[in-house]
Amino acid sequence: MNNKNKRLIQVKKPEFRWTIDPKKHMLYLDVGAWQGNEEGILKTNFILITGYAVALCSYFPLSKTARKNWKLGEQGFGQHSVEYASKHIINFLDEIVPFGNLLDHIQYFYRSKESGTPFWDENSLLIVIGDLHLHCYRQHDASDSEEVLVDNFIKKEKNTRKSLESDFCNFLNTIVIFKDKYPDLNIKIVQAGDILEIWELEQIIDKLVGSAKMLHINAEEGMADEYVLSHMSLQERDARARARNPIVFAEAQKYDEILDWFVKRGIISRVPPPHRYTRDVIAKSFMYVMQTEIFTKIFDSIQYLHTWSIPFITTIGNHDSALKELIQKNKRHPLDRLEYVVEFNEGSDLIVHIEHGHRFDSFNKPGGDWFGRWVTGVNVTFENMGWGDFLKKLEEPIKEKFYEIKLLLHKIKVIPNLPLNERNSYIKASIDVDTWFKTNQGKNVSIFIMAHTHIPYARKIPRNIDYRKWLEKNITE
């Protein structure tokens, strides 16, 4: 027995789930996120699908806190774990885990019946990655005062959210090493949306432009009427404002310097006075700046995947909903495909369906995301003040209370139908997608994968059911 197999069967772990027949059940998966430490949980989640096996994994070992929060089942892998686990999944985990137990990195595991239909081609490996929310700036060298100014304005040194850029690059580079060892294995990567935090960038620039404008108005107060000001050059206006209100003007200059950083890189445009800047983030050079200045390591790693014929496919999320337009303006990017939905037809009658999942969220769905954008703007303000994601801390408790109230009203017959919490709403949506395929194309969704919630989760769902009635019997989760 080789070393990696010994590492597998040394301990009994609670993550193993059960066998599934894709003809009778569909598998709902939430890939979670790759965001670093969020609410005390280190999130570096990804899904592996190959042949008869599916595993929802973590790049870093799962902590006891994570297991408790994720409410894992009690069935263990036991002595037969190697027999159940796919060789490709075990070999891949063995590549990314230098020591310790491989099972510490698997949260959920499902296996299709050998006599049934496989989830995926046995000579292929599908890797699905969750939300990245890469902030469109980075921590810069202290030697570059201009860029430190931008970074300090946005982060205030108190915001500890990190993109884990180096860890994600190591993960992508490990995929290349794995491909080198198994050259005949066909590998595909799908990143399930919100790769870039564009909403946040829009809010930051909007607030920068608004603050700069107000400070300049205050600095220019009493200089002349609007007509005279509009016929002055910017240099003349600034010279007079500096002389009349030096303290206020100095503050305005700080905002100008930060905005100039965006202007130089073509992310926003300078326009004639009295406006100074536009608030339009959609610029031709946006993706070029992301690749060459902000996330050079990540985009270089994605580009390197192509030399090994490994596609990097991306779905569109809510926070990067502008990405399609940005990419159309700049063709130089390493993303193989950018879609709202990605579907793989595995076999004559089975579909693997992947999307971000925000279209099922009434606050963030396309065309109705005003509330989500507003919340992002408020969070940008709080983060700039060093308070962190203030609203996010309140979001889950509020949702829980509303759901508890609805359940109570249902029990006393005020609400006739069993209410669905957020997770059950997403599962119901996955069943609706499966029903659409069955009705319109005569095919079943074998696996429905989404992201968006940042909470990794998996569940086996019987086909052809009344979901609310089924949920009445399975309300414990």
Image (tube, helix red, strand yellow):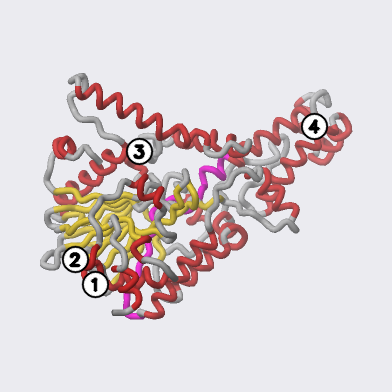
Q: CA distance from mark 3 to mark 4?
A: 43 Å
Residue 324 shows in this picture: no
Q: CA distance from mark 1 to mark 4?
A: 66 Å
Q: Earlier in the sequence, mark 3 or mark 2?
A: 2
Q: Secondary structure at mark 2?
A: loop
Query: Which residue is identified by label 3?
Result: 361
Q: Earlier in the sequence, mark 1 or mark 4?
A: 1
The quadrant holding residue 351 is bottom left
Query: Which residue is identified by label 1?
Result: 122
Proximity of marks 3 and 2: CB atoms separated by less than 8 Å: no
> Position of 466 compared to 269: left or right?
left
Q: Amino acid at mark 3?
A: Asp
> Badge 1: few (under 14), some or many (20 or more) residues near its Cα, within 10 Å?
some
* Mark seen at residue 118: 2
* Residue segment shown in magenta: 183-203
Looking at the image, which residue is at 18% across and 28% down?
417
> Badge 4: few (under 14), some or many (20 or more) residues near its Cα, within 10 Å?
some
Query: x, y (%) of residue 449?
Result: 30, 53
> Position of 332 compared to 399: left or right?
right
Q: Earlier in the sequence, mark 2 or mark 4?
A: 2
